[in-house]
Image: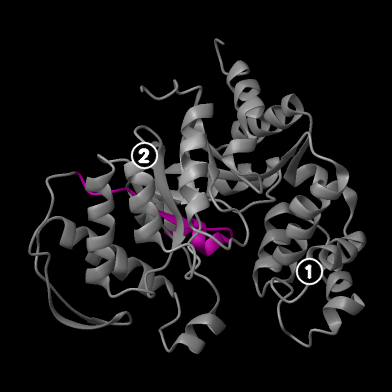
Amino acid sequence: MPTAPVLAPELGAYVLPGRASSPKLAVEQAVAGEQVGLGSVYLSERLGTKDLGTVGGAIAQATERVTITAAATHMQSRHPLALASLAITLQALSDERFVLGIGRSIPQVWKAHGLPPATNAVLVDGLGILRRLWAGEEVSYDGPLGTFPSLYLKDRPDVAPPPVLLTAIGPQALKLAGEHFDGVLLHAFLTAEGHRRSADAVRKAASDAGRDPGAVRLYGMVVVAADLPQDEVDLRVRARLVTYLNAPKLGESLVQANGWDARVLEAVAAHPLIAALEGRTADGALDGEQLVEVSRVIPDEWFDEGAAVGTHEQCAAVLRSLQAAGADEMIVHGSSPELLGPTVRAFAATAPGA
């Protein structure tokens, strides 16, 4: 049976958004995404139920058209030879529909895992190693990523190497993406002005580095809760923003990118439910209802400016407005693909010339 037509090639959505107990849902959701007309599906790797190689390979065989993007995995969580092999194998399995997204995470994670932090040098060196391995070169490396006397891929499929994206929110990360990577994955809850400033920073960095700014693709990310009851909206939107604002460094970066009032971060940190965590992050430590309770100290306009809530048509309009602020593609977060049919159709109806 042929797949459904692409209604919105510049619109994608996450499979397994949030925490997940079964990886099988990812395949079902990817198939649903293809059927409703999405152009791409995204997987945010979380080891346990969201292993990139396993889930990505299953999606590649269950779908025919959608782009499959890791958004994101990390340079340090796999040996560079293993990451290079995984990515090029997924590129072959998917008939060149794979995109590799790389993230930073936080220094505490890498210290706990006994791995180097995701410094700029680690990210750039790792990118260089991947590209050289995919080109068939033998690589000898001794640097911040580790010591590797001789790396090479013995068997390489006859496919183009996958594009490599970088997740970025702060000015240094945006600059790094523009200078070296094929694209940048922007963070959720950026306002239109946040998208615009981010796009300008990436494209200026690309131009200053002698690259074609138009060749570096920007992916905007929006938490969407379309046509849902208020309690569901609260869990998908309000609770999620609390976890972002509470995360080390991320909250400060998000507030800075949007020009928001930094005093709200202090109010979040001072909330009794957060203060009781004694430095632990809220994500995983508090349940949804508790996170929603914390969210009451956040101005309502932050949710209005950074997320898409309301009817499917209203959510589609928000997606288009944020895309117009500088993104080449938009990613839906918080709502899995099988829920997005009406939103995809409304989004497609607002395309230029539709």
Q: What amino acid type should be assigned to the residue bearing mark 2?
A: Ala
The span from disc 1 to disc 2 (Cα, nearest Å) is 41 Å
Left or right? Give the position of 200 relative to 147: right
Image coordinates of residue 207 in percent, x first then y, are 39, 45
Secondary element under disc 1, as helix, strand or loop, is: loop
Whether residues under marks 1 and 2 lie with C-beta atoms below 8 angstroms apart, the answer is no
Residue sitting at 26 percent across and 48 percent down?
91
Closer to the camera, 239 or 127? 239
Instruction: Give the residue at mark 2.
Output: 215
The residue at 57%/37% (across/down) is 326
Q: Is residue 58 visible?
A: yes
Q: Which residue is mark 1?
A: 287
Residue 233 locus on image (x, y percent): 80, 46
As for residue 94 lying within the magenta part, the answer is no
User: Mark 1 or 2, which is nearer the eye?
Assistant: 1
Question: What span is colored magenta in the figure?
Answer: 160-176
Depth check: 137 or 214 in front?
A: 137
- Residue 213's image quarter? top left
* Callout 2 secondary element: helix
Query: What residue lies at 83% left-to-right and 76% top-to-bottom?
Result: 269
Q: Indicate how the structure is coloured in the image.
A: one colour
Residue pictured at 23% horizontal, 54% vertical: 88
Q: Please say whether residue 182 is visible from this viewpoint.
A: no
